[in-house]
């Protein structure tokens, strides 16, 4: 019940296209859903996050869509750029301890 | 703020040797996490501390692994004796648990190679 399932494992998109990464969770107590971006040789960095009281959050070219009833959330990268090529992790947390449960990661490649 | 600082960045050691990884969290953060990342297993939580107290160490793979947080600005992860299967990138992350929670800040990691 603590798992967060992420798909796809890898994704190749042409420059200018839309990248979509999906995550699903089981634990309805989760109340914070961040996405992390990791470049080779670096640690994951917080990209964008959402709480379940809204269905969508947009920051620049990055949007989180959240479906509470389906227990799913997704990351959309509009106008994808080669510089977006990285590994993306979804995560979820609950409670005051705020221990994050991470998805397995998606390796995104944006072709020039 | 300099962010979460980990040292060393790279460590190559022989099997059976003791390895100590170090972490300085962001000032003011009250939670600290140690993760291990491999291609096969992804990001694995090893242990986390809240207010310098270990809360959950269920992810520590074996008794060969130990972690300490003697004060709010320093933590260590020790492997003794090290084995080739311990080769991985080890990340430290810190956060402010509670109302002000805004996710984790990760360090740049320590790439450990045990030969």
Image: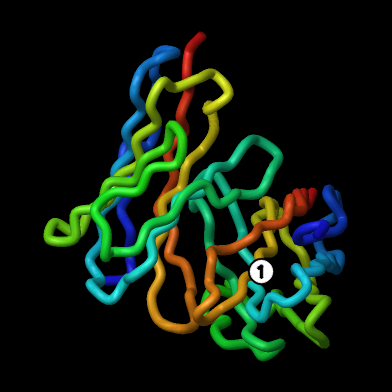
**Whether residue A2 is situated above or below residue A77 in the rendered picture:** below
Q: How many marks?
A: 1
Q: Residue at x 72, y 60 (%)?
A: B83
> What residue do we see at 60% from left, 78% from top?
B48
Q: Tell me which corner region of the image, top left, top right, bottom left or bottom right, holds residue B14.
A: bottom right
At 38% across and 75% down in the image, what residue appears?
Answer: A94
Left or right, B4 with respect to A99, comes to right
Q: For the N terminus of chain A, give its image quadrant.
A: bottom left
In the displayed structure, A26 sits above or below B106; it is below
Instruction: Indicate the chain on which mark 1 is placed.
Output: B
Q: Residue furthest left?
A: A69
- Left or right, B54 with reference to A97: right
Query: Where A2 falls versus A66 (above or below)?
Result: below
Quarter-of-image position of residue B8: bottom right
- How crowded pointer 1 is (Cα within 10 Å; few <14, some 14-19, many 20+) is rated as many
Provide residue B94's location: percent of width, then percent of height: 66, 69
Q: Residue furthest top?
A: A112
Render colour scheme: rainbow
Helix or strand or loop: what does disc 1 sit on?
strand
| Residue pointed to by mark 1 | B94
Q: Is residue B87 left or right of residue A72?
A: right
Q: Nearer the viewer, residue B46 or A71?
A: A71
Q: Looking at the picture, how far across and down is residue A111, in whole percent?
A: 48, 12
Q: Position of residue A109 (x, y in %)?
A: 48, 23
Q: Residue at x 34, y 35 (%)?
A: A76
The image quadrant that residue B106 belongs to is: bottom right
In the displayed structure image, the side of residue B80 where residue A49 appears, left or right: left
């Amino acid at each position: 019940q603590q798992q967060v399932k992420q798909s796809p494992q890898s994704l190749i998109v042409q420059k200018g296209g839309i990248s979509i990464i999906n995550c699903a969770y089981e634990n309805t107590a989760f109340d914070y859903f961040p996405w992390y971006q990791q470049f080779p040789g670096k640690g994951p960095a917080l990209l964008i996050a959402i709480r379940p009281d809204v269905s969508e959050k947009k920051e620049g070219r990055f949007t989180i869509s959240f479906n509470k009833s389906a227990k799913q959330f997704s990351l959309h990268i509009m106008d994808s750029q080669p510089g977006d090529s990285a590994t993306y992790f979804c995560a979820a947390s609950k409670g005051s301890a705020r221990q994050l449960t991470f998805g397995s990661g998606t390796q995104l490649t944006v072709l020039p | 703020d300099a962010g979460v600082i980990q040292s060393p960045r790279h460590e190559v050691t022989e099997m059976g040797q003791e390895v100590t990884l170090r972490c300085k969290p962001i000032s003011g953060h009250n939670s600290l996490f140690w993760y291990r990342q491999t291609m096969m297993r992804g990001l694995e939580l090893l242990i986390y501390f809240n207010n310098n107290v270990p809360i959950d160490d269920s992810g520590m793979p074996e008794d060969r692994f130990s972690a300490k947080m003697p004060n709010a600005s320093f933590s260590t992860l020790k492997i003794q004796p090290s084995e080739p299967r311990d080769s991985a990138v080890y990340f430290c992350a810190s956060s402010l648990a509670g109302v002000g929670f805004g996710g984790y800040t990760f360090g740049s990691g320590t790439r450990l190679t045990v030969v």
